[in-house]
Amino acid sequence: MLWNKEEQYTEVPFEKEADLEEAVHFVKDALFGSTRIYLDDKKKIGQKGNTNNLPDGYLIDLTNKQDPKIFVVENDLASHQHLKHIAVQILEFSLSFESSKVKVKNIIKEMLQKRPVEWKKCEAFAKSNGYENVDYLLESIIHKKDSFNALLIIDELGDELETVLISRFKFPVEVTTLKRYQSESGKLLYEFEPFLNEVTEDTEKIDISDIDTIVIPAREDGFKEVFIDENCWYAIRLNSSMIPKIKYIAAYQVAPISAITHIAEVKSIEQWKDTNKYILHFAEPAQKIKSIPLGKIKGKAPQSPRYSSRDRILNAKSLDNVF
């Protein structure tokens, strides 16, 4: 329940996938932000005679100027779908995408042409980032290596499903949840975390294209026994689409030290046991650096993994300069 003195809101589960799709369309600006474009026309992709699929939509992500992306979107209700169905659907999307990239590009281009505002946004991005036009921008995104990304929007995400998505696929799969609440007077509220919100919070001072480091909070015993002695750090939640960018890991030692003190190069990132988390193995023992203490801005101490860059960390005077 959501409550205030005027009204109380109770959860109203989505009965049909069409209800969820309508809600995604309604909240898309707040859910995806100003640097992303959500296209929800349904067009079949894949080659004739092979795997064919009908994605629920596409998300063009223009946040990273050096690496724009396209996510193939699947909307699902947890109560209606078995884990296996969702996993198979996403796998089939990847196969159809890879086998019909020209078709995918043309479909997305046609969708944009029907939306003048979104077309102009892509046109402006292309012009300011060295692409000849929107057609060339889309072609560059779709035809580059490892271009497939999936986004699952679901009403409820259990640990089991998240673990399956981590363990089964080599390509990035982002997941976001969306719930609906209604008051007695009929007003609706929607509950969700903005897409890649953790990344957005860390890019106020640093361009997302410069991110190469994950900063983790560490207590004294875990820091000494794991970060220093085992040359790794485990049970970390990460955004799957950010994993290829992570080249370093930095340790923020919590109070009483309250500072970033060490950094290590990351050799590999793997699923942590049979969970929905990851383990980062170091290429060599962590190096001690000049301590980077808390600054004057409240709330900068990491409570969970945060994104930054190695250069920014090494040149920072305090955490105010890191995030």
Image (tube, grey):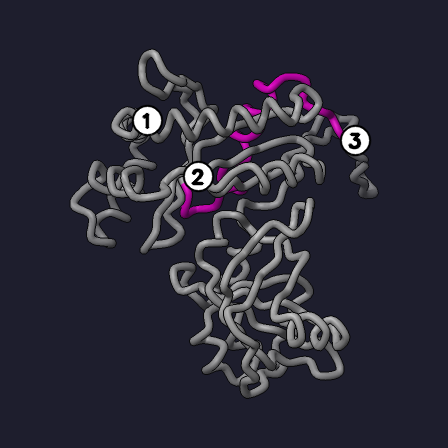
The mark found on residue 10 in the picture is 3
Q: Which mark is residue 149?
A: 2
CB under 8 Å between discs 1 and 3:
no
Tell me the number on the disc at residue 99.
1
Q: Residue at x 63, y 41 (%)?
A: 192
Disc 3 versus disc 2: distance between alpha carbons?
A: 34 Å
Q: Secondary structure at mark 1?
A: helix
**Nearer the N terminus, badge 3 or badge 2?**
3
Disc 3 on helix, strand or loop?
A: strand
* Residue at image point 52% right, 74% down: 284
What percent of the width, then of the height, locates residue 288?
A: 57, 84
What is the residue that sits farthest to the left in this orientation?
A: 132
Numbered disc in front, either 1 or 3 = 1
Magenta-colored span:
11-36
Dot label at residue 164:
none
**Residues tagged 3 and 2 counted as in contact (Cβ below 8 A):** no
